[in-house]
Amino acid sequence: MEKRILVPLDGSALAEMSVPHAVSLAHATSGTLTLLWVVAPAPVTLGVPMDGSFPASPALMEAREREPRVAREYLNRFVERLHVAEGLNVETIVQEGDPASMIVQYAEQNPSVKLIAMATHGRKGVSCWVFGSVAEKVLHASPVPLLLVRQELHASIEASTSHYTRILVPLDGSTFAENALEHATALAATLRATLILFTVLPNQYDRVMTNKGGVGEWEWVAAPWAREAEWATSYLEDVAQNIAGAGILVETKISFGDPVEEILRMETEAAADMIVMSTHGRSGVQRLWLGSVAMKVVGSTTRPVLLVRAKERTEVPELQPSAASRSLQVC
């Protein structure tokens, strides 16, 4: 089946930041690109006062009626540019409606779409653009993984990296996290990239209060993270062994501390080009720490993040963290 990457654009330099990454993945997967521009419906009224509706101004109506033509001209120029420079098969779509709804609808109605690539900007803008807006809505409902590319507004397309040789995959031992692992493994095989499997445990120097057996006999003791570290090491090694059997290079790493801070630190230490991780959907499936960490990472990293919406599974993994570890890893 044809592999198609959907790239929503709106004419802005910010939205264009996702294009080099989509192009790189299209080349690696022998895929094609679909450039989608969603225009807002032309307004009929401007407002609803007490005594009726104000008609939209002629200037506003003319601007909205002109937008589909402007969008097609812009996308056609992009197609020429990509075809000449990259030799890719590119199609363009201009639709009318709500941006998030139309992006998701197109992906649902076209099974050939395997990925959506979108751009977002830095920390200041993430809260107002991602959360409660287009990207978050797409993430909650998208039937395919979402690649979010964060760039500062002053960055240029030429400055964007689109080469993936090392992929960081945060895992927490849950089956939900392993949804991302499946996609990361497929990408690594296609791109001939190295996978870095990574998990974060609570601070190894934490202490907990325990009862010595008698009434009121409590004492502070070192938290039993040695046992959790042994579990994590065994878990990652088992996963790595299965992946390495397919000829993929794999590294495993464990850290202690805050999950977001450690993931951001590890992406630099491990020289990762991309982060692939799971997140939960609108229903809020059960998860360990990854469900709430993913979007925080998006808001701080400069690496592209491939977010895989976790799907519930019925099978029980062979290795799971202890109940104590689960309760302390939830964010």
Image (spheres, helix red, strand yellow):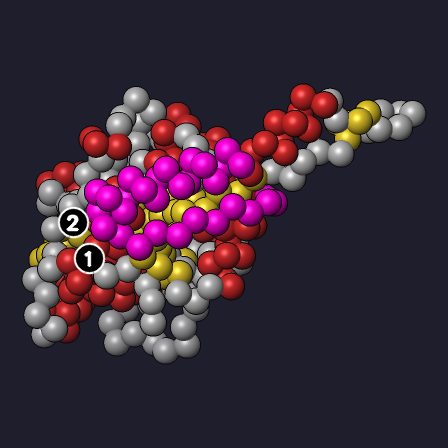
Residue shown at 72%/23% (left/top)?
Answer: 58
Residue shown at 7%/62% (left/top)?
Answer: 249
In the depicted structure, whether residue 123 falls above or below residue 131: above
Distance from disc 2 to disc 1, alpha carbons, whole Å, reads 10 Å
Q: Measuring from the top left, give residue 322's x and y in whole percent.
A: 29, 65
Dividing the picture into quadrants, the one containing residue 247 is: bottom left
* Residue 119 in view of the camera: no
Q: What stretch is highlighted in magenta?
A: 69-98
**Left or right: 28 in relation to 47:** left
Marks 2,1: beta carbons within 8 A:
yes
* Residue 97 magenta-highlighted: yes
In the depicted structure, whether residue 33 falls above or below residue 75: below
Amino acid at the residue labelled 2: Tyr
Q: Which structural element holds mark 2?
A: loop
Dividing the picture into quadrants, the one containing residue 207 is: top left
- Tag 2 residue: 164
Tell me which secondary structure the magenta stretch mostly adopts: helix
Q: Measuring from the top left, give residue 72's x and y in whole percent.
A: 48, 40
Q: Measuring from the top left, give residue 14's x and y in whole percent.
A: 37, 31
Amino acid at the residue labelled 1: Ala
Q: Which mark is residue 28?
A: 1
